[in-house]
Amino acid sequence: MLIQKDIHYSIFYDLRNHLRDQKEAFMLIKDWMATTILTVDANTSVMRATRTMKENNIRRLPVLSHGKLAGIITDRDLKDASPSSKTDMDLHEMYYLLSEMKVKDVMTGSPVCLKKDDTLEKAALVMLGEKISGLLIVDDNNNLVGLLSESDVLRGFIHATGIQDGAYQFVIDMSDAGGSVSRLVDILRRHNARILSILTSFNDAPPGFKRVSVRILPEQDIDAMASEIAALNGYNIVSQSLDDLSNLPKK
């Protein structure tokens, strides 16, 4: 699983792209959040807020009051506030109710917020813990500067792993002792492998071990590298594969 608090992320880049990738070594919210944001005033009618979401195909709207962030309203909030289809009200009464009901009456007044310099990893933990699919991003004065969705977080993690580049993956259990990852990297470097990412999980490995997932570009001498890794004492290749991205399923 990508989104777990017990996973530690390390991203390694080859020297050819060192300067270009230096700024990408940390996944910060500000690099992935949306900065063009539709907002709604707290006194806007629920009916208008619903229409705004549908017309723009969005699931949430930050709520402002006198120009300051006051809350957030989601499509679920609007659905819960709408009269049931089983109600005895006629259509005219239903529309009147929705036109009179204000966003401030159904919004979440204390939304979960993070700062733009927080990491995507932190955002993922917050979303998972709070069971939410989006975060408002604010500056030090609590001014709204961005919106981060679960899709933005996934895009960041996909970028970090290198899977979109068609990278070959080794998953290896190795000793939790210091320097064990360095021995693996030394082998890959000797074979001139371009290392795109290394992910380390302590939760999935046996006691005293850690599970390391490393992605490299696939044109390297895979069999020779696998043999050399397997020959190391205490290193066990759990799996190795190249993801087939040529025919991804679609809805």
Image (cartoon, helix red, strand yellow):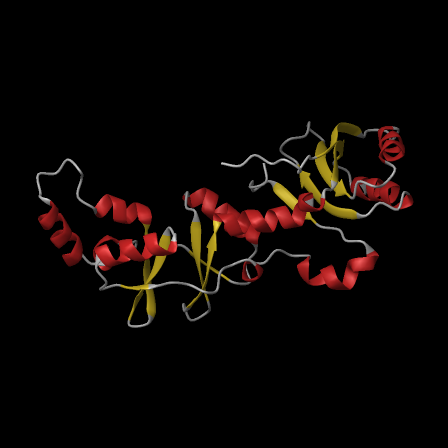
Using residue 55 as the reference point, say whether residue 117 is left or right of it: right
- Which residue corresponds to the image point at 31% horizontal and 45% vertical from the top-left? 76
Picture residue at 39% right of the left edge, 52% below the top = 57
Residue 41, image quadrant: bottom left
Quarter placement of the N terminus: top right
In the image shown, does 122 or 145 lie closer to the viewer? 145
Instruction: Tell me the quarter of the picture where residue 25 sits.
Output: bottom right
Residue 126 picture location, percent across and down: 47, 48
Give the residue at x 52% y 63%.
116
Please state the horizontal and vertical placement of residue 8, each as a whole percent of the image.
65, 45
Q: Which residue occupies the foreground of this view, 92 or 195?
A: 92
What residue lies at 16% left-to-right and 57% top-to-bottom?
99
Q: Name the residue nearer the viewer: 30 or 110.
A: 30
Total marks placed? 0
How far across and down, in percent of the image, does residue 219 sit? 83, 41
> Residue 109 at what x, y percent from top left?
29, 57
| Residue 29 at least partly seen | yes
Q: Tell me if residue 109 can be seen.
A: no
